[in-house]
Image: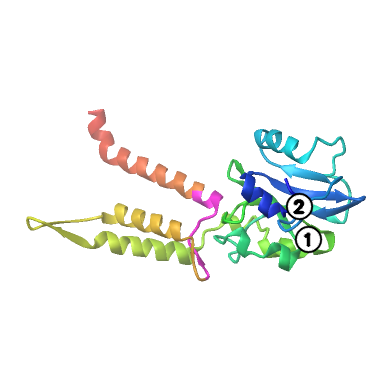
Amino acid sequence: FALNETIRDLVKRYGWRIVFGRIKRDGQSILAYPSARFTTGDIVSVIGTREALDEITPLLGKKSAEDIQYEESTFETRAIFVSSPEVTSRKLQDLRLREDHGALITRIRRGDGDYIPHGSLELEPGDLIRVMAPRERMAEVTAFFGDSYKAISEVDFVTFSVGLALGLLIGSVKIPLPGGISFALGFAGGPLIVALVLGAVGRTGRLVWSLPYSANMTLRQIGLVLFLAGIGTRAGYGFLS
């Protein structure tokens, strides 16, 4: 490929599902921003699946015996929890990480899955991201994303209550049908429909409709336990008989 193309252009043209981390050039390390360009002799760190790396290595050149991923330099790599409402449910390309903070996200862990970051990917509360940034700006980048384990373990009562209230309201509305009959979504169907809509919306202004992953799983388990307890209480005696 042409060396005058930017990393962004190369990834778009070839459809690579990888992330470039650092570039070592003439003994100095720089971050592989999407606007950067390769030159002959560069040593590049690449993050991706084994299949993707096997595909891209012959195109770039050959595997280097020198590992620059963890060598000491002016850049620092840190794992950060996403807990700030200001960055959740927003696309990575809208966060202006390079322009405002000189930082680069190299990977994202959500629940038990690992994801390759791209411009249209939206961060969710509780995501664990690996960020590279200049050492003197890492504290600034950490504060930008929040990095509070306590915050991602809590539920936003405002958005949770508003969503639940809207669901109960919609569930109580009777929908007329031909023949003079009507039906309602009920106290289960209404909140379910509203939750699906708000989950797709993501955020409205400063209100974030996404739940942190840990809080989401906890509520699921509690809901399942209460459901089974209700079924057992009502049907247990008849089943035993």
Q: Examine the image and state in which quarter residue 238 appears.
A: top left
Question: In the figure, 135 relative to 235: above or below?
Answer: below
Is residue 9 part of the magenta span, yes or no? no
In percent of the image, x 36 and y 40: which residue is there?
Answer: 228
The extreme top residue here reads 241
* Proximity of marks 1 and 2: CB atoms separated by less than 8 Å: yes
Query: Where residue 152 sits: x, y (%)?
Result: 59, 56
Query: Where residue 111 sits: x, y (%)?
Result: 58, 44
Dot 2 amino acid type: Arg
Say which element carries label 1: helix
Query: Where residue 30 sits: x, y (%)?
Result: 83, 55
Query: Where residue 26 sits: x, y (%)?
Result: 92, 51
**Pointer 1 residue:** 138
- Locate the C terminus by quadrant: top left
Q: Residues within 10 Å of mark 2 (few under 14, many from 20)?
A: some
120 left or right of 196? right
Question: In the figure, 209 relative to 233: above or below?
Answer: below
Decide if residue 111 is in sight here: yes
187 left or right of 42? left
Residue range in magenta is: 206-216
**Pointer 2 residue:** 78
